[in-house]
Image (cartoon, grey):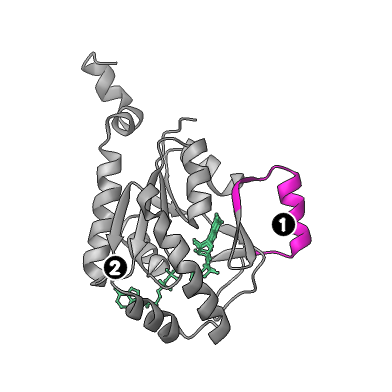
């Protein structure tokens, strides 16, 4: 499938800093819109329905799967998460860049459907730092933190299947890295042809 907008997919083990990095990027770049996923997990802390996620009961999620409403969905940490078609298709068709914070299984599904999507994996600087960020965030119960750390080993082994890797050690450096990748994505030949078709035509190269 081909669209004028770019799809940017970010995955990371829980606690690596993915949500903080994406939030910082969105504040710097008004051309990027977040995809809001559906999930069957309960809201945490300050999370609001329709902002971080659409929090839905299992039955509603089942109905959306049956109606073919997701471009991808996956089981993550014992819950289900999915990107609805609505969350991305209208926006990229209109030329916006859309960023998805999803797990590695979802990222692989997106790459199959949208070959031009760019896949970015965020790594923490160390295991010790990953654990301490999850503890410092203070929003997950101890057993949930243990499950997320156990899953982190499996998730990080998937970094090899991504286009880019960012090590989130110094936060500002990692934001800069993320911005740089998005910028480079917009300069790819096909992205430029999509965004600047008139220029290509006037130069007689289309
Ligand atoms: P976090 O890991 O602390 O950010 O916790 P979340 O509960 O926000 O996310 C749980 C997992 O689900 C993460 O691996 C996300 O990347 C993943 N995830 C979130 N939204 C989606 C989605 O729409 N599709 C897929 N496949 N995974 C998602
Ligand atoms: P994720 O979305 O990947 O689960 P978060 O963005 O919620 O991760 O970050 C986990 C915790 O680590 C948060 O408390 C966040 O403020 C903190 N954090 C993120 N990046 C850094 C960094 N570079 N250095 C120190 N702490 C960080
Ligand atoms: P959390 O529950 O901490 O918000 O997210 C846990 C994991 O689920 C994260 O790795 C997050 O990226 C992933 N996730 C969130 N939304 C989706 C989604 O729509 N699809 C998939 N596949 N994973 C998601």
Residue at 29 percent across and 59 percent down: it is: 166
143 up-or-down from 97: above or below: below
Residue at 54 percent across and 86 percent down: it is: 142
Which of the numbered marks, if any, corresponds to residue 18? none
* x then y, percent, for residue 58: 75, 62
Mark 2 surroundings: few (<14), some (14-19) or many (≥20) residues within 10 A: many
Q: Going by the image, does 99 lie left or right of 46? A: left
Q: Is mark 2 on a helix, strand or loop?
A: loop
Question: Would you say residue 158 is visible in this rendering?
Answer: yes
Which one is nearer the viewer's eye here, 70 or 31?
70
Q: Going by the image, does 137 lie left or right of 57? A: left
69 up-or-down from 13: above or below: above
- Residue 180 in the magenta stretch? The answer is no
- Residue 58 in the magenta stretch? The answer is yes
* x then y, percent, for residue 193: 31, 27
Q: Mark 1 points at which residue?
A: 61
* x then y, percent, for residue 2: 46, 30
**Label 2 CB-ligand 2 distance < 8 A:** yes
Residue 134 occupies quadrant: bottom left
Mark 1 surroundings: few (<14), some (14-19) or many (≥20) residues within 10 A: many
Q: Mark 2 points at which residue?
A: 168
Residue at 58 percent across and 68 percent down: it is: 77
Residue 200 occupies quadrant: top left
Stretch of the chain drawn in magenta: 55-73
Q: How far apart are marks 2 and 1 (CA)?
A: 32 Å
Q: What element carries label 1?
A: helix
**Label 1 CB-ligand 3 distance < 8 A:** no
Question: In the displayed image of the protein, which residue is found farthest to the top?
Answer: 204
Residue at 57 percent across and 57 percent down: it is: 37
Q: Going by the image, does 14 lie left or right of 89? A: left
Q: Which of marks 2 and 1 is in front?
A: 2
User: Looking at the image, is mark 2 or mark 1 earlier in the sequence?
Assistant: 1
């Amino acid at each position: 499938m081909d669209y004028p907008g770019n799809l940017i997919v970010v995955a990371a083990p829980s606690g690596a800093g993915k949500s903080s990095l994406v939030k910082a990027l969105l504040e710097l770049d008004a051309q990027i819109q977040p995809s809001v996923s559906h999930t069957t997990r309960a809201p945490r802390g300050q999370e609001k329905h329709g902002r971080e996620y659409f929090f839905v009961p299992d039955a509603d999620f089942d109905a959306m799967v049956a109606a073919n409403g997701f471009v991808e969905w996956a089981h993550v940490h014992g819950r289900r998460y999915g990107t609805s078609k609505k969350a991305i298709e209208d926006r990229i068709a209109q030329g916006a860049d859309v960023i998805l914070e999803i797990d590695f299984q979802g990222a692989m599904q997106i790459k199959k459907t949208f070959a031009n999507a760019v896949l970015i994996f965020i790594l923490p600087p160390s295991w010790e730092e990953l654990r301490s960020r999850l503890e410092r965030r203070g929003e997950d119960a101890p057993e949930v933190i243990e499950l997320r750390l156990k899953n982190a080993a499996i998730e990080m082994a998937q970094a090899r299947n991504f286009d880019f890797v960012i090590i989130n050690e110094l936060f500002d450096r990692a934001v800069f890295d993320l911005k740089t990748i998005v910028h480079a994505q917009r300069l790819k030949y096909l992205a430029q042809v999509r965004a600047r078709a008139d220029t290509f035509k006037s130069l007689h190269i289309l």
